[in-house]
């Protein structure tokens, strides 16, 4: 698994700058003003930093962007990373500047000259978030272990305390990214469950429900998805009990470790990307790790349904009718609309067993949400304005794009079945909305609930502000903030 770069905070030591042999990062205000540490860099480099601050290259940088000056004369450093950032930045700009530094970070150790800049903790989180490189299956070009980060600033103890929880969340984000990036022959349903079992070392209570238990519970819509695969279907229940006696907040994730579409086989082109179809379960897993690492004073339960959707002699056929744990019957029109079948049973089980105060499910559910929102925002569907608005506020605060989409009984007619209580698809029109309407049928009337369709944001083909291309870990930071703001004691 990928371990985030270590970040330590220390008091500013101007005399240590010239002898540092790795990289050095320094901040210059948009006006070109240099603080004490930047002036020391400028003196060591015989005015090079000041000349850069007066250049068109610097002027063209947006606030939060960075430029690398390689092998600066007068210093032992391999590079000076110059980030354009004012002394009192916004939280978003601070994180972006950190991310720009993290992107430029090499395997060398990094000395960050923060001086008396505000939001040092957010800058450090940005560095750690972007300094990610998934290399679990690379051979022959082994990179040295990345050097750590020393962040010099005027109040190191205060900054370190503020950064502690933020860096714990980065651990959760990396866990999600690693799970989502992993190929399906390595991250089988069994291996996924085994990795989640390791969270017990952090104080998470982990329970793995095998197929016989799922059959006894009546989770036949979930089991129907995995019938064509040799990988056993599972549900993993993770409980973090950091609160008092209150009911938990529930997170539910779709964990399809590979999705061929089943009998409704997908086209070959791009099918390799379906290793990320467990992205919802990956986010739930990352949140559970984050809340455990930071010892959240809340009760949180995470449930993930782990299946593999394959064609095979026992695979579910289009036209089959299966009965959910709730007792409703579902006509399977398209076996490639499998995620909602997994979620239906796990949502019902979460409510029946835990009686949560609220519930959010995440899934790479529909291609239609990508048509509607692209790769910038996840689709948010909800039956409760308070929970929805709280999540949207948390997502905005963490710069994780999200947009509310409608739910309305008018769409239910598309799910009517001639032979069962409902169909699992409603046609091309409003495909993301009808998927949400399907899920809502498995949400009890008094349960505050959100459905997050993360198909466009879980894994992307181009780098984002805080991640290289591939798995983003979208949602871990927003959900962690939601829990901290709304459910912690």
Image (cartoon, rainbow, N blue to C red):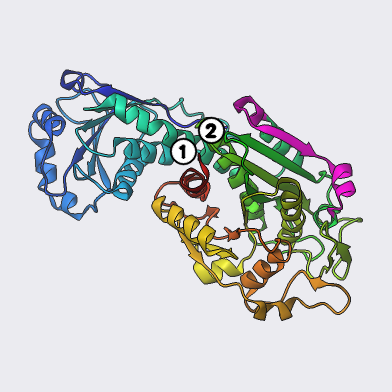
Which residues are drawn in magenta? Answer: 198-219
Residue at the image position 53 percent from the left and 37 percent from the top? 290
For residue 314, side relative to residue 275 (left or right): right
Up-down relation of residue 235 to residue 443 (above or below): above
Residue at the image position 46 percent from the left and 38 percent from the top? 132
Residue position for label 1: 132
Indicate the position of residue 404 as horizontal and vertical percent values. Answer: 51, 67
Indicate the position of residue 245 as horizontal and vertical percent values. Answer: 63, 37
Taking depth in this image into account, of 479 and 22 the one nearest to the observer is 479
Up-down relation of residue 182 to residue 279 (above or below): above
Asked whether disc 1 touches disc 2, contact meaning CB atoms under 8 Å apart, the reply is yes
The secondary element bearing badge 2 is classed as loop
Residue position for label 2: 2
Up-down relation of residue 250 to residue 136 (above or below): below
Taking depth in this image into account, of 403 and 126 the one nearest to the observer is 403
Indicate the position of residue 244 as horizontal and vertical percent values. Answer: 59, 35
């Amino acid at each position: 698994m990928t371990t985030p770069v270590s970040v330590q905070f220390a008091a500013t030591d101007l005399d240590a700058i010239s002898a540092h042999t790795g990289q050095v990062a320094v901040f210059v205000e948009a006006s070109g003003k240099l603080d004490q540490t930047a002036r020391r860099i400028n003196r060591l480099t015989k005015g090079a930093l000041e000349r850069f601050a007066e250049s068109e290259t610097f002027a063209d940088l947006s606030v939060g962007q960075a430029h690398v000056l390689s092998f600066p004369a007068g210093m032992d450093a391999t590079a000076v990373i110059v980030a354009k950032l004012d002394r009192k930045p916004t939280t978003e700009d601070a994180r972006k500047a950190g991310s720009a530094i993290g992107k430029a970070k090499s395997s060398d150790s990094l000395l960050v000259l923060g001086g008396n800049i505000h939001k040092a903790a957010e800058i450090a989180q940005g560095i750690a978030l972007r300094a990610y490189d998934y290399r679990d299956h690379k051979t022959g070009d082994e990179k040295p272990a990345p050097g750590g980060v020393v962040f010099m600033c005027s109040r190191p103890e205060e900054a370190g305390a503020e950064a502690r929880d933020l860096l714990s969340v980065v651990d959760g984000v990396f866990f999600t990214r690693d799970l989502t990036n992993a190929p399906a022959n390595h991250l089988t349903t069994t291996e996924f469950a085994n990795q989640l079992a390791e969270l017990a070392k952090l104080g998470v209570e982990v329970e793995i429900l095998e197929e016989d238990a799922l059959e006894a519970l009546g989770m036949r819509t979930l089991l129907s998805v995995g019938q064509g695969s040799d990988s056993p279907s599972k549900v993993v229940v993770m409980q973090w009990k950091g609160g008092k006696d209150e009911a938990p907040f529930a997170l539910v994730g779709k964990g399809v470790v590979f999705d061929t579409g089943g009998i409704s086989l997908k086209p070959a082109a791009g099918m390799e990307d379906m290793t990320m179809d467990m992205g919802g379960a990956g986010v739930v897993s990352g949140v559970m790790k984050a809340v455990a690492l930071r010892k959240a004073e809340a009760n949180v339960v995470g449930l993930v349904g782990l299946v593999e959707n394959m064609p095979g002699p026992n695979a579910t056929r289009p036209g089959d009718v299966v009965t959910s744990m709730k007792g409703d019957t579902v006509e399977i029109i398209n076996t490639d609309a499998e995620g909602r079948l997994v979620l239906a049973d796990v949502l019902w089980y979460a409510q029946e067993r835990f009686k949560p105060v609220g519930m959010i499910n995440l899934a790479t559910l529909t291609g239609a949400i990508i048509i509607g929102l692209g790769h910038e925002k996840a689709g948010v569907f909800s039956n409760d304005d308070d929970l929805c608005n709280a999540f949207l506020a948390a997502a905005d605060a963490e710069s994780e794009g999200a947009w509310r989409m409608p739910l309305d009984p008018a769409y239910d007619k598309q799910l009517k079945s001639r032979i069962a209580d409902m169909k699992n698809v409603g046609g091309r029109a409003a495909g993301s909305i009808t998927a949400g309407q399907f899920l809502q049928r498995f949400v009890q009337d008094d349960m505050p609930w959100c459905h997050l369709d993360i198909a466009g944001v879980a894994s992307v083909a181009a780098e984002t502000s805080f991640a290289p291309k591939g798995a983003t870990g979208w949602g871990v930071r927003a959900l962690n903030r939601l829990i901290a703001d709304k459910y912690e004691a």
